[in-house]
Amino acid sequence: MSRPIISLTTLGFLISLVFVFGFQPAWPFSIIEPNASSVHQAGLHIPVALELGNLPGVTKVNYYWYGEDEDMLKALVEQKLALVATAKSTPPFGGNILVPEEAIGTYRLLAMAEQGGRQSQHESLAIFDEVLIHIEPNAQLLEIDFQTDKPLRFGRAGGVRVYDQLDSLGKTFELPVMGIFSDGVTRSLRRHPTGTTYQSANEHIITVDQDGLLRLVGNGKTMLIVKNRNQEATLDILVEVNDDPNQPPVSNPGNMQRVSSGERVTLNGLASYDPDGGSLQYHWSQVRGSKVPLLDPYSAQAKFLAPFVVEERTFRFILRVTDIRGADSLPVSVDVVIMP
């Protein structure tokens, strides 16, 4: 078998690339246990393990639990640090981590490494990996409850001013749906990965998406039917708001971007619009990747500095917009892929 021949010209070009750009070895950092999409029981410890390859200088790894699409800023405030692992842990930088007792549905396990002395070179260095797993309680669902007034009233029916933007046509509302289980734990059932389904008895008054996001679309009385496992619950809803026609705005966070570490990134929501021609308010949030500081998260164009990564990583952001009458768009996500 003949061997490939590399010309001196080609070899010289490759050597020049090393001198100009520097040699950057592949430094894998990945969660190898638990496996993505695996199913685990709430309230139990499960093993976690990492593949670090030849990544130098790691002093510890912090692990966090997040809901699949949970706003990371809110989660960070709630201090969801689940495990701190070092080289002395068994296995190194791994161990046994407690699955949150209140968890159900799809959760994200995020592992973030810290390197001794490396932060002085790149303060925004981000070495992390994440996996989505499914969590189920070993308990029976006894009852579905709504942590809200019953019946649920909007507008004049709830004693709110008629023109108050909090209660107007097109306004959305995240319905708090809770499950009471036989192990004594109350768990949020709002999102569809928990097994919850929704049905509005009159979609001319209330519409609802698969994650329990209600939208006011008309005045009157209706009922919401919620099912999960072998349980069903109903919620009476009364809407009495200003009935001036108002179409909800449309969120457009732009297209997926691929950028390099250290670049300034602009999340562009300028293509969002109000069908009625009104002005918009913007709200950006981050739901994937290591947390990055967003500049101007309440403007059409939020910005951040792409952190330095050792491997290609995906960061996900969600944009919601609100018109001047208080109508909301549905949340729409956009990914930013950051390369070393």
Image (tube, grey):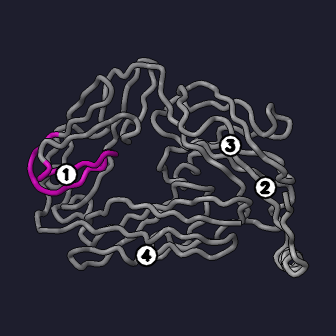
In front: label 1 or label 2? 2
Is 252 above or below relative to 186? below
Residue 105 x, y percent position in the rendering: 45, 36
Residue on which disc 3 sits: 31
Closer to the camera, 227 or 324?
Answer: 227
In front: label 4 or label 3? 3
Tell me which corner region of the image, top left, top right, bottom left or bottom right, holds residue 250: bottom left
How far, Cα to Cα, is label 2 from label 4?
36 Å
Q: State the SS at label 4.
A: loop
Q: Which residues are magenta?
A: 203-223
Residue 154 x, y percent position in the rendering: 19, 51
Residue on which disc 1 sits: 154
Residue on which disc 2 sits: 27
Disc on the earlier residue, 3 or 1:
3
Disc on the earlier residue, 2 or 4:
2
Residue on which disc 4 sits: 300
Is 264 above or below relative to 164? below
In front: label 2 or label 4? 2
At a point 73% along the width and 41% down the height, the residue shown is 50
Q: Are circles 4 and 1 on residues that touch, CB within 8 Å? A: no
Q: Are circles 4 and 3 on residues that touch, CB within 8 Å? A: no
How far, Cα to Cα, is label 1 from label 2?
54 Å
Disc on the earlier residue, 4 or 3:
3
How far, Cα to Cα, is label 4 from label 1?
29 Å
Q: Locate residue 10 relative to residue 324 in the image: left or right.
A: right
Of the 4 image quadrants, the one containing the C terminus is bottom right
How far, Cα to Cα, is label 3 from label 1?
46 Å
Of the 4 image quadrants, the one containing the N terminus is bottom right
Furthest-front residue in view? 1
